[in-house]
Image: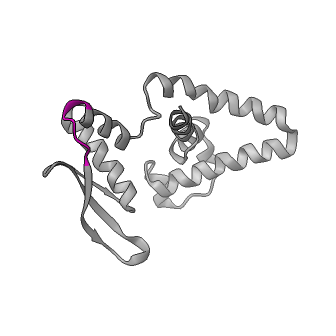
Amino acid sequence: MERFITNWRASLVNYRMLASIADELGVDKYLYLSKGESKDKNSKARQIILANAMEAIIGALYLDQGVKPAKKFVKAFIVSKLDNILKNKLYLDPKSKFQERAQEVYGITPHYKVLSESGPDHAKDFVVGLYLNNELISQGKGTSKQEAQVDAASQGLISKGW
């Protein structure tokens, strides 16, 4: 039960969710973003900026008007997403989803292997393979091993039709 609560909270309050809420509210219109960040709506840097802006808005609302208006805002724009998260099991990250299905269908636990890494130490790019036994199911890319694993799991879910 504790894992479930932690996972739905992580699905509800993470930079992607906060960025999507910021997009819904048009927060980016009030921010000075670089040309690259303005154009690429899906970049991680842009999403993190928007998520930080949402946190700042909530904090400013709390400091300016108190806990009740801040709580009302959070309920209206963040907690309102909870039903969708629960209905569509979005609290299960792709790695958890893939592992559960792999164990259910094949009775084995998937594993990940770094296939390549490139770039300087401060800006590495990773390619990670997702395996069931020795079979490569999919590959994922990311700026961290964890991010690449999540991408590989997402690609694996698609390739398996799960």
From the viewer's perspective, tell me whether residue 92 is left or right of residue 77.
left
Whether residue 153 is in magenta: the answer is no
- Residue situated in front as seen by the camera: 100 or 156: 100
Residue 84 pos. (x, y %): 50, 24
- Specify the quadrant of the image occupied by residue 119: bottom left
Q: As drawn, is 122 to the left or to the right of 8?
A: left
Question: Which range of residues does the magenta coloring cover?
Answer: 104-110
Picture residue at 61% right of the left edge, 26% below the top = 80
Q: Residue at x 35, y 44 (%)?
A: 95
Could you tell whether 148 is left or right of 13 in the image?
A: left
Q: Quadrant of residue 90?
A: top left
Q: Residue 151 in the image: state x and y as whole percent.
A: 32, 49
Q: Is residue 123 above or below residue 23?
A: below
- 55 vs 86, left or right, is right
Can residue 85 be seen here?
yes
Quarter of the picture holding the C terminus: top left
The dominant secondary structure in magenta is loop
User: Which residue is nearer to you in this view: 43 or 144?
Assistant: 144
Whether residue 30 is visible to the viewer of this picture, yes or no, is no
